[in-house]
Image (cartoon, helix red, strand yellow):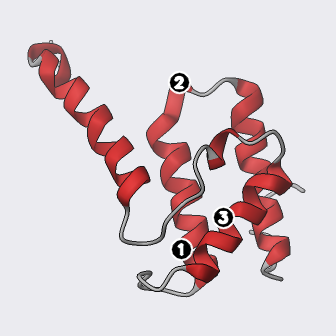
Amino acid sequence: MSHSHAATHPAHRATGARWSQRVTDTSDAMDLDPGVFKLGSAQAIARSLKRSAERSRRRKSEPYRSAMSMLTFYINRAGHNLSPTRLRRLEAAKRALRRLFHKPAERGARG
């Protein structure tokens, strides 16, 4: 029988949540527009991320990679807390971001 670390140390769960929020808010990769991941359309999310990535002077990689990394990080950290509708919108934002940066679709990806 195994126990998760968060179950045996309740403060760990809260600290983890604050850590990921802090990374999203203050990442050295780029400054994000407030509420970017809650925008109403995938295209709006992708446009905002593209703008932020291109404006940033602190990012360590090309704008496309920085923007996609922040989007993927948010999806992975929000995990099961995302509604199916929001998850679909964020996944669609990945496809929109690829189109905005003129990148090919991922293999096996739909859309």
Q: Are marks 2 and 3 in contact (CB under 8 Å)?
A: no
- Apparent side of residue 43 relative to residue 17 in the rendered image (left or right): right
Q: Secondary structure under badge 3?
A: helix
- Apparent side of residue 95 relative to residue 28 in the rendered image (left or right): right
Q: Residue shown at 77%/71% (left/top)?
A: 98
Give me the C-alpha separation between circle 2 and circle 3.
21 Å
Q: Crowding at label 2, few (<14), some or many (≥20) Cα neighbours within 10 Å?
A: few
Can residue 26 be seen from the camera position used here? yes
Q: Residue shown at 77%/64% (left/top)?
A: 47
Q: Residue type at mark 1?
A: Ser
Q: Residue type at mark 2?
A: Asn
Position of residue 10 relative to residue 51, above or below, is: above
Position of residue 79 relative to residue 94, above or below, is: above
Q: Which residue is mark 3?
A: 49
Q: Secondary structure under badge 1?
A: helix
Q: Nearer the viewer, mark 2 or mark 3?
A: 3
Give me the C-alpha separation between circle 2 and circle 1.
23 Å
Q: Residue type at mark 3?
A: Leu
Can residue 107 be seen from the camera position used here? no
Q: Which residue is mark 1?
A: 66
Give me the C-alpha separation between circle 1 and circle 3.
9 Å
- Apparent side of residue 72 relative to residue 96 in the rendered image (left or right): left
In this orientation, which residue lies closer to the viewer: 39 or 17? 39
Residue 108 percent across, percent down from the top left: 78, 61
Q: Indicate which disc, 2 or 3, sits on the residue closer to the N terminus.
A: 3
Residue 31 circle label: none
Q: Indicate which disc, 1 or 3, sits on the residue closer to the N terminus.
A: 3
Q: Residue shown at 51%/34% (left/top)?
A: 79
